[in-house]
Image (tube, grey):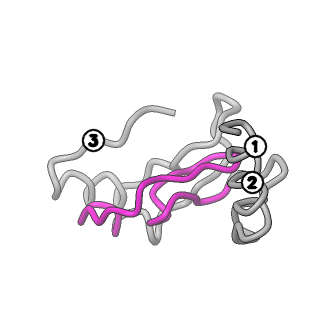
Amino acid sequence: MKFALILVIFAIFAVVAPTSMRVGGACSKQGCSGELCGDEPMISPCIFKAEYACYQSATCARQTTGRCGWTHTDDLVRCLAGFGKVLPGN
């Protein structure tokens, strides 16, 4: 029963997931507030954190490591620093 419920929830999510989350290998902004960057579908809790505004104009792209990540720009680093946050390495 528990397994069937998980499958139903997954099926519903797959049908209603925004097309921006169906990425197929391309890096894209994800999460409820667009605060995640990845090439696989990801979800996050829908909570508000002021620093998430920094990611609205940020670039989510494949980095030199081969992984998706936020492109380090002066604007993004400065914005996050204003909230006492540091952009993690890619």
Residue at 48 percent across and 64 percent down: it is 32
Which amino acid lies under the numbered mark 2 shown in the image of this protein? Val
Q: Residue at x 64, y 42 (%)?
A: 68
Type of amino acid under label 3: Val
Q: Earlier in the sequence, mark 2 or mark 3?
A: 2
Q: Where is residue 44 in the image (x, y as percent from the top left)?
A: 47, 53
| Residue 71 as seen in the image, left or right of residue 27 | left
Q: Name the residue under label 2.
A: 8
Asked if the magenta segment contains residue 79, the reply would be no
Amino acid type, mark 1: Ala
Per the rendered image, the range of residues in magenta is 28-53
Which residue is under mark 3? 86
Few, some or many C-alpha atoms within 10 Å of disc 1 (few <14, some 14-19, many ≥20)? few
Q: Where is residue 18 in the image (x, y as percent from the top left)?
A: 70, 71
Quadrant position of the N terminus in the picture: top right
Please give the label number shown on residue 4: 1
* Magenta portion: prevailing SS class: loop
Assess whether mark 2 and mark 1 are in contact (beta carbons under 8 angstroms).
yes
Please tell me whether mark 1 sits on a helix, a strand or a loop.
helix
From what the image shows, is residue 72 above or below residue 20?
above
In terms of secondary structure, where does tag 3 sit?
A: loop
Residue 37 relative to residue 79: left or right: right
